[in-house]
Amino acid sequence: MIRRFIVSLALSLFVLLPTISLAAPVQVVTSFSVLKDLVKQVGGEQIELTNLVGPNGDAHVYQPSPANAQAVAHADLLVINGLGFEGWMERLVEAADFQGLMLAATDGIDVIHLEEHDDESEATHHDEHEAHHEDEATHHDEHETHHEDEAEHHEEGKEDHHAHHHGEFDPHAWHSVINTRTYVHNILAALVKVSPENRAYFEENAARYLSQLKQLQTRLAAEMASVPANKRNVITSHDAFGYLAKDYGFHFTAPQGMSTEAEASAADVVNIIKQIRQQNIQAVFVENVSNPRLIEQIARETGVNIGGELYSDALASEEQAAGTYIGMMEHNISTLVNALK
């Protein structure tokens, strides 16, 4: 009798267990490591997360695998950066016959238009040219000697520059903490949409992480303010830091342009070497997703120091300090500040 009562009670308790504990975790796929960390911060233990382009991986040249297509096919939510960053994503989604919800995390941000970005760069170079007009005049003969060669490379570089744009916009928006907070709001809304029963859990995680990002934003602004205005010109491998430059009043120049697929022309390299000498730039920076040889060559020819490695299109491995978004931003800012101030 007692045994029958215990069995009956156990069965009753099993039936009354909350459905949330029995529900399968939400299947989420992220396109690259920055998004993986952001989604993990919000989704926590209620999601099962698969990431495509891993730590130190280059999304510009990534080739999806059959396993990637299978993961996407079974996903409830696919989170991408958007703005043309994942040029291969449309083909992958079609091959996987993806039926879930796809989120472009950049929805609603204040994007940098590439025409605007190029105009600002050209205006800066024009001002530099005017400031150093007399110095250039002393090298008139040298200029004439190489005029035809430079003109040829200019046309080649011009074609290459436009061929490797992502589209109308600069997609590297996560280098602004302001934008990343929008990413988090978008991720929260998407997770609630695919798993409304976990709304309170997701909202609590998002609120905690957004508070951390706000504190990060304050710390980084204070650090960057310590760099004198005349030392805020930065040379990197490819043009991934436009949003960081916009937030903190810096100017970034890169021989490869917006994509790591692009090859710098001889004229681009010559102009950067001139810029370094004219502006007395003290350091150049390599990136975790780019071949360092070109920056190393520029450093040798100008005698400037390599100020360190910046994380541009991917996080470091998880056991490293830059293996999270917050860690990456802290690393990049401290590396810049220590080399420039």
Image: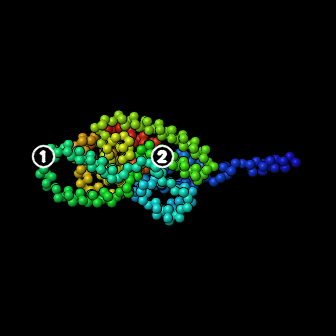
Q: Which mark is first along the chain, 1 or 2? A: 1
**Is any part of residue 238 visible from this angle?**
no
Q: Amino acid at mark 1?
A: Thr
Q: Which residue is mark 2?
A: 182
Name the one closer to the observer, 302 or 87: 87
In the picture provided, is 31 more to the left or to the right than 27?
Answer: left
Q: Position of residue 153 (x, y in %)?
A: 23, 58
In the picture provided, is 78 more to the left or to the right than 225?
Answer: right
> Which residue is painted at 27% across and 58% down in the image?
158
> Which residue is painted at 60% across and 44% down in the image?
201
Describe the element under mark 2 as helix, strand or loop.
Answer: helix
Q: Which residue is mark 1?
A: 138
Residue 288 position (above or below residue 155): above
- Where does the C terminus fall, quadrant-wise? top left
Describe the element under mark 1 as helix, strand or loop.
Answer: loop
Q: Position of residue 334 (x, y in %)?
A: 38, 38
Q: Amino acid at mark 2?
A: Thr
Q: Return the mark for residue 261.
A: none
In the picture provided, is 71 more to the left or to the right than 254?
Answer: right
- Distance between mark 2 and mark 1 Cα atoms: 51 Å
> Which residue is painted at 50% across and 62% down in the image?
93
